[in-house]
Amino acid sequence: MPKTIALVGAGGFIGSHWIRALLSRTDFRILAVDLDFHRLIDLQKSEAQKENPRITFCENDIAESAVVEKVAECDIVVNLAAICTPSRYMDEAIAVIESNFTHPIELAKACAKTHAWLIYFSTSEVYGKTSSAAEPLLEDSSDFVQGPITASRWSYAVAKQLSERYIAAIPHLRWSVVRPFNFVGPWMDFMPGVDGEGIPRVLANFSSALVKNESLILVNGGEAKRSFTAIDDAVEFLFCLLAHPEAAYSQAFNVGNLQNELSIRELAILMRKIYAEIKGISPETLPPMREISGEDYYGKGYEDSLRRVPSIEKAKRLLNFTAKIPLQNALEKSLRWFVNHYGA
């Protein structure tokens, strides 16, 4: 009998990409759990459901105990659900902590009872307040350093960190932790004022500004550096994880691309260039970039990590995985999708 796999947060950015890959590359029966499936509407249509009887859609909240019990009955449980946009860390700290600690822990305890393999999506944010001179971050030895309680920016990172620690301490639980380093690709986040409100993460933020012919805003001068990872590489990582379960149990993995590190200012310049090429215009015709302080943009209590680059040796050694897609390719694919999807 084919294995069963539950994707909690299946309608989100990562989940929507992985569920399509699972359909085309495996014979798993899939339980898709989320409150919103707009990214998967084509798979939900009645005719599509007849063609894909392996998918069961569950439009429910993982906070409900009955949903947790149903999910934990699957052989593999992938928990992707999270509130994970910086603006919400600042304004909704309690909801962020519940989403990233309280609810995942109840699911983890249920998986321990059913012996399901829990693949928990954490975040590179757990490494915290790193400096511009930070070395590559190691899963099992780098320190976690967060800011003070008055800096609400760290509510997400601390909740994820505590959930990791709790999961690792649960007796008889088979678990793996994934720490994404800035995944980018089509369907990431939303366009403010069109299909969402607030401030999305940087890719959607800059893409929205470009499509609306607005200035790209550089928070704190855009000095912070990140290592960006194509969503297609992220999908490949997940298949490597599934192919090596014994090596993956009780392990945390960074998923990132060392070749794709650049500052947010450099990212803005590159995205302006790619967008101009897509539209057949000169980058000089676009509105100039604008700088703003983190507190003015996100609110009081905002702090940042100045450099976050992963060590990728563990995933390579245990799972035979290395991210390969250049950032230029990933950004071009993402921006072309964004332009086509929003009709600009």
Image: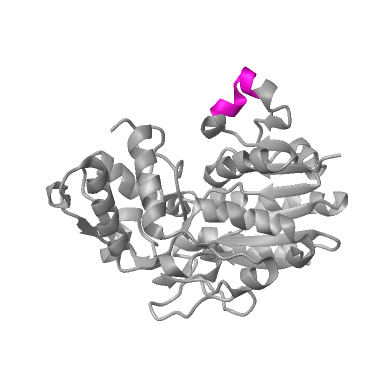
Q: Is residue 310 left or right of residue 306?
A: right
The percent position of residue 295, horizontal first and vertical second, equals 32, 60
What is the quadrant of residue 186 in the picture?
top left
The percent position of residue 115, horizontal first and vertical second, equals 85, 53
Examine the residues drawn in magenta and state their main secondary structure: helix
Q: Is residue 272 left or right of residue 228?
A: left
Point out the residue furthest to the left here. 285
Residue 7 to residue 261: above or below: above
Front residue of 229/157: it is 229
Residue 304 to residue 130: above or below: above
- Name the residue at 33% across, 62% down: 264
Point out the residue furthest to the top here. 46
Residue 42 to residue 27: above or below: above
Report if residue 200 is visible in the image. yes
What is the quadrant of residue 160 in the picture?
bottom right
- Name the residue at 46% across, 41% down: 187
- Name the residue at 79% across, 64% down: 246
Task: State yes or no: residue 46 in magenta.
Answer: yes
Bounds of the magenta segment: 41-48
